[in-house]
Amino acid sequence: MTGIWLIIAFIVAIVAMILLISKLKVHPFFAIMLISLVLALLAGIPLTDIPGVIGSGFSGTFSSIGIVIILGAFIGTVLEKTGAALKLADMVIKVVGEKHPELAIGLMGWVVSIPVFCDSGFVILNPIRKALVKRTKVSSVTLTICLSCGLYIAHVFIPPTPGPIAAADKLFEAAFGANNVNLLLVIGIGVLCSIFPLIAGILYAKYIGKKIKSADEVTDNGEVVKTYEELKAEFGKLPNGFNAIAPLIIPILLMAASSIVTMVHWVGFFADLFKFLGTPIMALSVGTVFAIIQLLTAKKGKDLYNLTNETLKTVGPILFVTAAGGVLGKVIASSDMVNFITEHANVLQVLGIFFPFLLAAILKSAQGSSTVAITTTAGIVAPLLSVLGFTTPIQLALVVMAIGAGAMTVSHANDSYFWVVTNFGDMTPEQGYKTQTLMTLIIGIAAMIEIFIINLIVGLIH
């Protein structure tokens, strides 16, 4: 099956998967794997190749974010057990005040995701989110979606995150030749274009938080879990600020340093060292060392084995469901769908600035990865820049933003970030569709509205 029928089959498959998970209560792992297999057969992938495609999609998740999830979850467990997460919540509240935790966690995610992938960022910041829930009594779902929103926006808009930096490089090279990318302009436009989606995301998070309750907000008996004061009293004296923040801030700084070294093309031993320590796996390994120091400082070193075991039990289901989502994405990538979309992109050219947005949104929804959607769309759009009328640096920067906005729209079961947010936010897949998926739709549209307005203003000026 190829062409438009494959697109229709994909849409039917996604609907069927949602029904299996939400209505028939089939475990997400089996639902996604079943749909992936059926879609592979319908897409005409040779029977002898299907096992390899499934294995590659499954293992790809473990090689990319599997260890990151384990280490990040371990750090979070230590911060919770030693009271460090509560100390971090106190520090955040002192800075922004108790009345604006949604804005605080959203902006925190936005800043962290500039150098750090959103998956890793969510895992790193989740302990602070959970502590803020206890500290402020704001809905857990609200803070989960605010954090996810902030992380996602910077992830697709602002270099040195790989997606937007690759798109900017490709578009500027097509227009002005190699090594002529204006990253400072792209970063500035990215910051500007973050305003509408941040506002929209936070407003939606506040709304949906009143409608949906996650598992960590109530006990099995429906009673409210322990209050912040009760939790704080259990620890007595909380850790000092540096011990509390070191396991989180040091990995972030290492990843930021690596991104900067890459962006400025620094070479040499120390550049290689920063790149090595700045990979998510190594950065979080360093953070894990500081977490163990925190555990020893709190005189709970004897709990290390049990906490490690507890962490592995917790992240196991997350890893396997996320890996299943990777299988679905790999099946789509191995089919003829992306080629078909690419070949017929000319149909969308009349849409102007909405063309890169819609193309990226189609690719994002189809195969799951925002980075793949951004880089693929940039490759398609680059030869068409003059046809579309985008020739000035600021117009090219806006095209990068339009691609990024599309690459947010939407996050669902074939996106690893969907499962990270859903599982670490203690939500069911059905709740994930109502929160994470709808939020990404809303912020993608909000971002595109802002980009359209800025593009109109730029057009009037020129």
Image: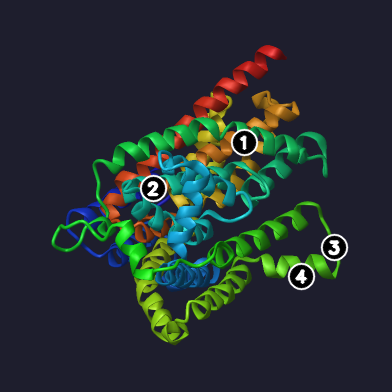
Q: Alpha carbon of mark 3 to alpha carbon of mark 1: how far?
A: 28 Å
The residue singled out by tag 4 in the image is 273
Q: Residue at x 53, y 41 (%)?
A: 360
Q: Amino acid at mark 3?
A: Val
Q: Which residue is mark 2?
A: 143
Task: Report the amino acid beneath label 4.
Answer: Leu
Q: In this rendered view, identify the residue nearer to me: 440 or 135.
A: 135
Of tags 3 and 1, the one toward the viewer is 1
267 horizontally vs 354: left or right:
right
Q: To which quarter of the image does residue 331 belong?
A: bottom left
Q: Earlier in the sequence, mark 4 or mark 2?
A: 2
User: In this image, 49 relative to 180: left or right?
Assistant: left
Q: x, y percentage for residue 457?
A: 63, 16
In the image: residue 158, left or right of residue 296: right
Indicate the position of residue 337 as horizontal and vertical percent values: 47, 49
Q: Nearer the viewer, residue 216 or 67?
A: 216
Residue denoted by label 3: 267
